[in-house]
Image (spheres, rainbow, N blue to C red):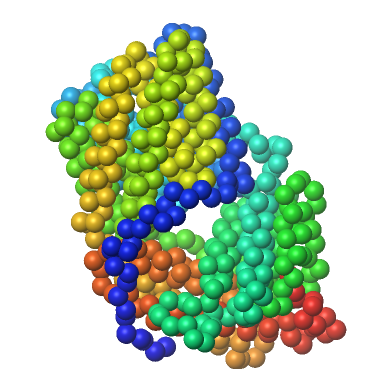
Amino acid sequence: MSSATPTAGTSPARRLSLAGVLRLRRPSEIWFKPALSSVAAVAPPNLLLLALGRLDLAMYTMAGSLCALYAHNRPYAARARTLAWVVLGMLGGVAVALVTASLTRNAVVLVTVGALLAAVQKALCDATRVGPPGNVVLTFISSAALFVPQTLGQVPGHLALAAAAGAWAWLVGMAPAPVRPHGPERRATAQALNAAAAYAVACRGTGERGTGERRSGEGGPGEGDVHAGARAAGYAAVQAAWQTLLALPATGARATTRHALERLVVRAEVALAAPADTDPERLRAWAHALRGGGRIPRTGDAPGDTDELLGVDAELAARPAPLWQRLGPLTPIAARTALGCALAGYASLALGIGRPYWALVTAAALYQANVTLTWSRAVQRVVGNLAGVLLFAAIAPLAHLGQALLVLCCLALNFGAEALITRNYWLGSVCVTPMALLVTEFAGYQAPGDLMTERAVDTLVGALVGFLAAVVVTNRRAGNRVEQAVTAADRARERTARLLAGPAPAPGALEAARRGLAAALTDLRATADGAAGEWWGRALPQERVVLAEQAGHRTLAEAVRRQATRPDRGASTRTEDVRP
């Protein structure tokens, strides 16, 4: 492939745009699940402590209860494992924090330990792709625990409370399994079908065939076709669906459902590769049928579907990279987190704020895949927290009428935070902030004015210092990762092209190659987008990225056409028979 001259990215000034940062999105399809799970996990321990007159212990039970926020998009077998690891990770962070708090009251040491914990939590959550809320909840709990006076003798009892609440959170997270045992995988498949349908409609609207060609007259190094965003979203949804399905057992009763859903995801893949031959309404009808608990729709399977599922088996045999290899590229992000959190905490201490962990957590919550996204999150965090401080001023008089009302207000805010945060991070923060302020009063009354002032100052300090750390700690590996992703996409395309040019490939070989190419192109787009938002790095080979994507999508489309005209399909070789 020819290598075009790398071009410089967008200037930092343009990247610090406020356009769209606060725009509200459509809520997540399952927004109510984490919201209800959070209330169900937090309410019983808190109400029990209220009845016992020991609300001062609520921080420890909340450490375990908040684990119920994780893994709602995963199949139940995978969810069970993920939730167990999240609970163990939470207990590990709390244990380090409590032991440290029992050994020293030096605030500088506590902030340093909190920053290191935040960096470890950020790296592990990103490497394992645990999903939202990511490291923020873990860092919030462990950082707060650092500043609660402890003795070594109290640590086992407090950890036991967190473990008991974590076990309850695990049960809450698994509770829907008997009612809708296949719900997560059905939703993931439906999302893939809808995304593929949206791409097919976008291609028809622009009169393009979706092979990645740039329309004539459009310049610049970036992709010029107007449906590139829909295509990227479609491939991302398909890859997410495959990850969900491949987490299911390959044998047993659940395997039958998995294979039926696999055929639907294959149809979504075909639609992305050949949108001109796709019926979007049929894809949407299949997606709609998956929303309930009825039968999984049939796809009108053709003989070649055996090869498609053999391609799935080939993907099943591929093992993920070891954890240490996944942690390597995250070193700059971990360094940013450690430095930013530490400096934010130190700045808060210098200003005489009594709760430096608020500034530390604010900084930890900012760090995204690149500096540009970190800037957006900083703006969202500041706006949401300051609005949340005003909301606290409005509800504090009600909460102060009694501890029961205090607990009920926290539960309502907990529900609101999880219900709103999928629309935009800042909107969820409007509820998170007063909830965090009210939780500090579980151990005793606090002057609202002091709480509000400290929270507002810590928010501004944490956001400013945290963002400056993101700018200073550059991610120079981003350009190398783009080069590697381009190379991987080229190799995947060449492998698929060789199979297309040769005689009839072995069963499943073409499908496995096509799926590998689709995955490589998805990774290339995500890597290029992430690197484009970094500052101070070397110029990215954007022309090479565009050429690799164009060639890759042309090869994908050719692979689909080959499947449509295979001689062994006999009378069923009409194009209509392979349309999704």
Please name whichever residue, 166 or 287, is drawn nearer the observer in this view of the structure.
287
Q: Is residue 174 visible?
A: yes
Q: Which quadrant would the N terminus be assigned to in this image? A: bottom left
From the viewer's side, name the closer residue of 125 and 290. 290
> Which picture quadrant has residue 394?
top left
Q: Quadrant of the C terminus?
A: bottom right
In the rendered image, is residue 493 in sight?
no
Q: Residue furthest right?
A: 571
Q: Is residue 382 above or below residue 278?
A: above
Query: Which residue is at 80% across, 48% downward?
Result: 294
Q: Quadrant of residue 181?
A: top right
Q: Is residue 164 above or below residue 549?
A: above
Horizontal side, residue 513 vs residue 221: left or right: right
Q: Is residue 575 left or right of residue 145?
A: right
Please state the horizontal and vertical placement of residue 59, each as a whole percent of the image.
39, 23
From the top left corner, tell me how far across and down residue 84 is, in percent. Answer: 49, 38
Q: Residue at x 22, y 25 (%)?
A: 354
x, y (%) of residue 297?
Answer: 79, 58
Taking the spot 79% from the left edge, 69% from the top edge, the residue there is: 301
- Image-based side of 57 in relation to 282, left or right: left
Q: Nearer the viewer, residue 364 or 322?
A: 364
| Residue located at (36% from left, 86% from top) | 3
Could you tell me how many numbered marks the image carries? 0
Viewer-proximal residue among 181 and 408: 408
Against 83, is 230 above or below?
Answer: below
Q: Position of residue 136 (x, y in %)?
A: 38, 40
